[in-house]
Amino acid sequence: MNSQERKESRLKEFLNNPKRGLWSLATPIMIGMMVQTIYMMVDMFFVGQVSADAITALAFNLPLLFFGIGLVFGIGSGVTAVIAQYIGAKDKKNADNSAEHAIILGLVLGLLLTFLGISQGKEILTFLGIPRSILPLAWDYFSVIAMAYTFLVLSVFFRSILSGEGDMKTPMIIQGGGTILNIILDPIFIFTFGLGVKGAAIATAVSQISVATIFAYILLVKQHSYIRFSLKEFSFSSAILVKIFKIGIPASFSMIIMALGSGVFNRILVIFSSEAVAGYQIGIRIDHIFLVPAIAISTSLVTLVGMFYGAKRYDLVRSTTIYAIKSCVIIAIGIGAFFFFSAPTFVGFFSDDQFIKDIGVQYLRYFIFGYPFIAISMISGRAIQGLGNGIPMLVLTFMRVLLVSVALSLYFIFILQKSIEWVWIAQLISVVVASLVSTFWLIVVFRNLEEKTLR
């Protein structure tokens, strides 16, 4: 069976059993992300052994890193949705051309982010409110990561191409291998070579370069995928580029808004102490254990919804989305209950500083009540994105992060002079509001699909 026959067989399988298709796509992503989450925790553990200042330096880097990665992941999700729609419509030529556009776009974005990171990174870290004493540590980390941005961007776009054709297993294996390499290299560079925080960055850079190289070899040299690349015969299409940007740019801005929000929260929390920032960022890392299944399911839904929409199976778009929401909410409740009782153990793994631990535990025991609402809004936004509309995700993120969460936090802390837990309460209120709006939006979209079916 050749690659085209395998792809047609996979599409038929998804149409016949969409629930099974959702899990067949989500499971490899989940496994790969679990490995990545383990890396994030091990990385913070190793950095935590250096000093409390080292954790804080890493914490202030996260919004800046998330800004660049968020921009790329957003556009990458546009690539995934466009390729999935073309495959669902059995238009292989445009699916191939979309992938070629993605690679060129990845090179351009990667080089641009590297230039901006190296030239402006230190100034941005200062703007984010990092204490002057910790700035050298933070710059040691970010200056190395910026050098590897091009490889990171290409890795994301290669994965997006494979996700668009429904292949989640290959990215899981490649990225999982890169993460394991990162975990092995961390203690070597941090402790054996005595490089501290900079060593953690070097380990990450080496692993990302390795991952991008393997992706390029498998897709461009071995021609592993259903998609075929022929950059020599590349034909520029503004229509394809506009379609990718129409879906991807709103998602990118959503991620950028989240990065800005994280930076604002760091500036609010540093008023209490730099340890408060570290405790909050530890809590966010632990949140990733819940976010792994949520992101895996929602990412898989983009592929399925795109294929079903391209095949004009609007009934499957609705039923699969509802099933994904129910599944994700159940998982959210289970993980949230577990974290409520085990938070001290998890947070204590990263730091011996009692104040840092207290902040991390307090954050988790408030925010876990928002997990089910995050599941609803995340799945809803991704489903609509799979239909080719990225605006709802942007609007929901802007409303949740800036209009509600940040605004309420500033009001509670600076106007009402409340204590630090009111930052967590503001975040909790924001996810509840976002889930209500996203549910209403999804209902409207489903009604429009029903009208299409009746025409």
Image: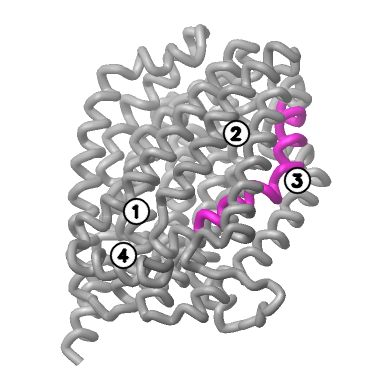
- Which of the two labelled residues, at mark 2 and mark 1, occupies the earlier sequence position? 2
SS at badge 1: helix
Q: Quadrant of residue 185?
A: top right
Is the residue 264 above or below the residue 131 in the image?
Answer: below
Q: Nearer the viewer, mark 2 or mark 4?
A: 4
Q: Is residue 64 magenta?
A: no
Q: Quadrant of the C terminus?
A: bottom left
Q: How many marks?
A: 4
Residue to which mark 3 is pinned: 117
- Asked whether residue 434 is in view, the answer is no
Residue to which mark 4 is pinned: 10
- Which of the two labelled residues, at mark 4 and mark 3, occupies the earlier sequence position? 4
- Which of the two labelled residues, at mark 3 and mark 1, occupies the earlier sequence position? 3
Q: Nearer the viewer, mark 3 or mark 1?
A: 1
- Asked whether residue 254 is in view, the answer is yes
- Which of the two labelled residues, at mark 3 and mark 2, occupies the earlier sequence position? 3
> Quick one: label 3, few (<14), some, or many (20+) residues within 10 Å?
many
Q: CA distance from mark 4 to mark 3?
A: 41 Å
Residue to which mark 2 is pinned: 267
Q: Which residues are magenta?
A: 138-160
Q: Nearer the viewer, residue 159 or 219?
A: 219
Residue type at numbered disc 1 = Ser
Q: Nearer the viewer, residue 83 or 201?
A: 83
> Quick one: label 1, few (<14), some, or many (20+) residues within 10 Å?
many
Residue type at numbered disc 3 = Gly
Residue 448 x %, y %: 25, 80
Q: Nearer the viewer, mark 2 or mark 1?
A: 1
Q: Which residue is painted at 52% across and 43% down in the image?
A: 174
Residue 302 x %, y %: 37, 62
Residue to which mark 1 is pinned: 298
